[in-house]
């Protein structure tokens, strides 16, 4: 498992990666906990047959013809949507899904993976807001670009290359606690909750 996979394995978010045809090549432990499938059970299977995703109106969403993994990373738009997906026991769970397209600079580190998806359970509060349509997603790319310091951008770049906290601290000659504090500030500025989300956001919006 390479360093990029190590990052996604350590995050608390459920993350899986698929190739351009939609077949699973990476599935982290958090995905196992959320959906009930282990990595050996899903590798080589089409993601649509695993998720069986449906939208909030109970319309079929996932299929073998999904265009998302076929998009070119440099032209792909950010994807952030809610789906009702199937767990291995047949139960359904509502999740918010983010798609992180693999840039050319990380192609060798990601194997055949065209896009990584992160899944997070939708809270009752979020569901109510979605159904009531009282809030809109805001693209805070300009906000993030203007407010990330050069040190924070550098730390994100090192993290995207697979470096862990101690590695980043060593390369920048700062303490590990300082690195963690920088990440806290990054999370706040990007409005994300984990290192994987921060890296994915930065890649999508060309912040690193």
Image (spheres, rainbow, N blue to C red):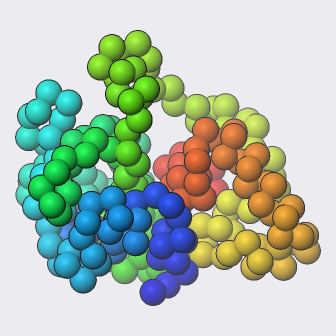
Quarter holding the C terminus is bottom right
| Residue 82: image location, x then y, percent | 30, 38
Given residues 88 and 148, the one toward you in this image is 88
183 on left or right of 176: left
Q: Residue at x 49, y 68 (%)?
A: 8
Q: Residue at x 58, y 48 (%)?
A: 193
Given residues 125 and 135, the one toward you in this image is 125
Q: How many marks?
A: 0
| 148 shown above or below 128 | below
> Does residue 3 appear in this view?
yes
| Residue 133: image location, x then y, percent | 34, 15
Q: Residue at x 26, y 66 (%)?
A: 36
Quarter holding the N terminus is bottom left
> Does residue 21 appear in this view?
no
Given residues 46 and 30, the one toward you in this image is 30
Location of residue 77 by image quarter: top left
Given residues 181 and 126, the one toward you in this image is 126
169 on left or right of 126: right
| Residue 185: image location, x then y, percent | 76, 46
| Residue 134: image location, x then y, percent | 41, 12
Location of residue 73 by image quarter: bottom left
| 197 shown above or below 2 | above
Q: Residue at x 12, y 55 (%)?
A: 90
16 on left or right of 66: right
């Amino acid at each position: 498992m390479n360093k990029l996979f190590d990052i996604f394995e350590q995050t608390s978010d459920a993350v899986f990666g698929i190739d351009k045809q939609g077949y699973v090549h990476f599935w982290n432990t958090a995905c196992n906990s959320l959906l009930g499938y282990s990595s050996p059970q899903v590798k080589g299977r089409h993601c649509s047959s695993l998720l069986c995703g449906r939208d909030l109106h109970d319309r079929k969403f996932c299929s073998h013809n999904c265009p998302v993994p076929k998009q070119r990373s440099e032209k792909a738009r950010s994807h952030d949507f809610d789906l009702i997906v199937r767990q291995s026991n047949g139960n359904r769970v509502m999740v918010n899904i983010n798609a992180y397209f693999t840039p050319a600079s990380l192609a060798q580190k990601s194997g055949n993976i065209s896009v990584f998806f992160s899944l997070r359970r939708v809270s009752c509060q979020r569901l109510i807001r979605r159904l009531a349509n009282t809030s809109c997603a805001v693209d805070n790319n300009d906000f993030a670009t203007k407010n990330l310091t050069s040190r924070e951008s550098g730390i994100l770049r090192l993290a995207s290359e697979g470096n862990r906290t101690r590695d980043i601290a060593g390369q920048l000659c700062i303490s590990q606690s300082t690195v963690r504090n920088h990440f806290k500030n990054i999370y706040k500025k990007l409005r994300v909750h984990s290192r994987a989300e921060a890296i994915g956001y930065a890649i999508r919006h060309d912040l690193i």
